[in-house]
Image (cartoon, rainbow, N blue to C red):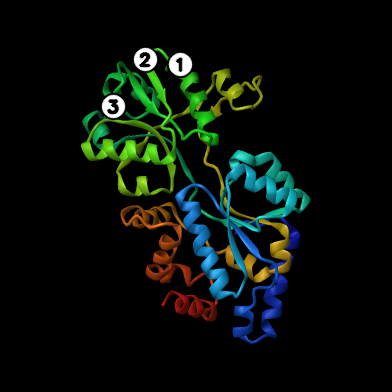
Amino acid sequence: MILRNGGIAAAIAIASTLAIGLPASAQAQECGTDRTIDIAEMTWPSAAALAHIHAIVLEEGFGCTVSIVAGDTVPTSSSMLTRGTPAVAPELWTGAVQEPWESGIAEGSVAELGDAISDGTVEGWFIPRYVQEAHPELVTAEDVIARPDLFADPEDASKGRLYSCPPGWACELSTSALFEAYDMGETWNLFSPGSGGALDASIARAFLREEPILFYYWGPTAILGKFDAVQLDLGEIKPEVYACNTDTDCTEPAGVTAYPSSPAVVGAAAWLAEEAPALADYFSKVGLTNDQISALLVYGDENQADARATAENFLLTEEAVWTEWVPAEVAEKVRASLG
């Protein structure tokens, strides 16, 4: 559990004390606030599924009034910091908004209630395992960069192709900077997939045909759950161009770690824990591993299920996991709502 705000810790402690004097069922069903709890549904599948999992539990189990709202890392965190809404972001990658987010925690406007991904996020460049098995010397990014012929661009066979991060995402900037830092321009093309869906389609097509592909990706995701991909060692990048292009101090002499693991937390407006400490206690327990989240996303991908249906399948099939997050009375109400 991640708690950086003393008031939140105190609120949870008070909730535990109050529980002693209340019937278990009353305590379990108490939302704690009459405000609508708006939950940010981010644009990537894992965060969207988690938003719906928690919406079902809060609404059906705790009796809260819940609203799902569209979100993304920067606008959602900014709105939380300045307006106290949305109330919860179930999978907030704070690495992209580190300075304002940490300032908000210090000022008491936002809080981290727990880890969304308990074993840390995954982000980097990948190749298929069958490519590495055929070429075991390909372990680092530099090993692969030296072999553009293995990853030929379908539109320009004289160069290799690196499939970049979807446009508009923070990782697009860092991927472009790494491409430049590795001085890949003469022998490689940096290919923009146009969207996350288009990137997924390109990766799936290559794997199904057992073709070589070098691509940026992140986890947990259905793609990494379905396909056996090997993450390349990107090492430490020292050229000034990387530091400059990622808006850090260009005079910093130390190397920059490529795609450092970003915390993925349950971010919340501070008022949520203050008004509804039972919910803060719930969110402190909801962390899932990369493998668990990837598995639930594979179901959604293979069944063309939306985020709500994916969430419902998780609640139906993974009772042993989520029932550990809630009192028995809450769990029973959630079960009943699922039929």
Q: Are marks 1 and 3 in contact (CB under 8 Å)?
A: no
Describe the element under mark 2 as helix, strand or loop: loop
- Amino acid type shown at disc 3: Glu
Q: CA distance from mark 2 to mark 1?
A: 9 Å
Please say if 154 is above or below 289: above
- Amino acid type shown at disc 1: Asp
Q: Which mark is residue 137?
A: 3
Relative to 120, is 213 on the left or the right? left
Q: Residues within 10 Å of mark 2 (few under 14, many from 20)?
A: some
Q: Which mark is residue 187?
A: 2
- Looking at marks 1 and 3 on the same chain, the residue that comes earlier in the sequence is marked by 3
Q: Nearer the viewer, residue 64 or 315?
A: 64
Q: Quadrant of the N terminus?
A: bottom right
Q: Which residue is denoted by mark 1 in the rendering?
A: 183
Please say if 154 is above or below 290: above
- Outermost residue on the top side: it is 186
Relative to 272, is 131 on the left or the right? left
- Foreground disc of the pair 3, 2: 2
Q: Residue at x 42, y 57 (%)?
A: 306
- Foreground disc of the pair 1, 3: 1
Q: Residue at x 43, y 30 (%)?
A: 164
User: Which picture quadrant has residue 202?
Assistant: top left
Describe the element under mark 1 as helix, strand or loop: loop
The percent position of residue 86, horizontal first and vertical second, equals 65, 55
Q: Are marks 2 and 1 in contact (CB under 8 Å)?
A: no
The percent position of residue 288, horizontal first and vertical second, equals 47, 58
Q: Quadrant of the C terminus?
A: bottom left
